[in-house]
Amino acid sequence: MREIVLDTETTGFDPLSGHRLVEIGCVELMNHLPTGEVFHRYCNPERDMPEEAFKVHGLSVEFLADKPLFAEIVADFLEFIGDAPLVIHNAEFDMRFINAEMARLGFPPLPMSRSIDTVMMARKRFPGAQANLDALCRRFEIDNTHRTRHGALLDSELLAEVYLQLIGGRQPGLELGVTKGGGTAAAAAIDSVQRDFRPARPHAPTDEETAAHTAFVAKLKNAVWLREEA
């Protein structure tokens, strides 16, 4: 089963107010585990960067000035996500921005039914608890000390780990990473082991063991071995 963990960074909170998408990051999952395939692009928003947004992700107008427009990356983006479900933390926010960019280019919107909202999953599993990404990383003991600011690809990678825990978690002691061929790393390791042929061990009783057994059976009343021999 293929899924895409997705996150975006933007210039603000509302695309209807003219805010734009500036970064998109995706992590491919196969059977809920990362394959190592990712999609990551920065986008020139063709507008200024509000100070509040800059404090969140650190992406300045100067940094984004030479980055491609969304129109230049949309084909690669759609090819990467294919028809896979989209795992998103607070899916409504990211889907609104992606669909606003799609609408500007005349593309049909991505349906919300494709999204799996991990905020909703977390609130259902832990009612009343904080459901932001940092809080969930702390709860599941996922190292996010390198997350000093929001970043679409980094947040997608962390969310992939959180999502695995929300759906049940990795079995301890097992390496279940997916290989490029679609199998697991554990299966690949087993297949690569050199197996030595060993002949079957002999299990026939010795003469002493046979004599001891016969003497023991002779002491039993109506021993099954004696009935079979009769």
Image (spheres, helix red, strand yellow):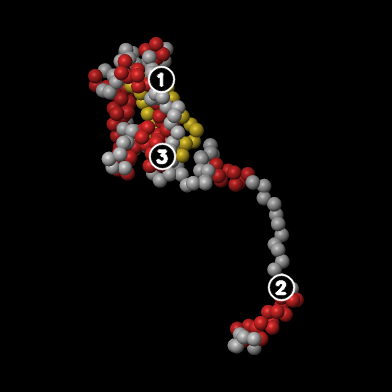
Q: Which residue is mark 3?
A: 140
Q: Secondary structure at mark 2?
A: loop
The relative height of residue 7 versus residue 171 in the rendered view (above or below) is above
The quarter of the picture where residue 207 lies is: bottom right
Q: Secondary structure at mark 3?
A: loop
For the point 70% across and 62% down, the residue is: 200
Disc 2 to disc 3, C-alpha distance: 56 Å
Residue at the left extreme? 17
The crowding category of the residue bearing disc 2, from other C-alpha atoms within 10 Å (few below 14, some 14 to 19, many at least 20), is few
Q: Are marks 3 and 1 in contact (CB under 8 Å)?
A: no
- Residue 144 visible (yes or no): yes
Q: Residues within 10 Å of mark 1 (few under 14, many from 20)?
A: many
Q: Is residue 197 left or right of residue 165?
A: right
Residue for point 38% across, 25% down: 150
Q: Nearer the viewer, mark 1 or mark 2?
A: 2
Q: Could you say which disc has been placed on residue 42 in the image?
A: 1
Q: CA distance from mark 1 to mark 2?
A: 76 Å
Q: Is residue 27 above or below residue 221?
A: above
| Tag shown at residue 205 | 2
51 lies left or right of 225: left
Q: Quadrant of the C terminus?
A: bottom right
Q: Are marks 2 and 3 in contact (CB under 8 Å)?
A: no
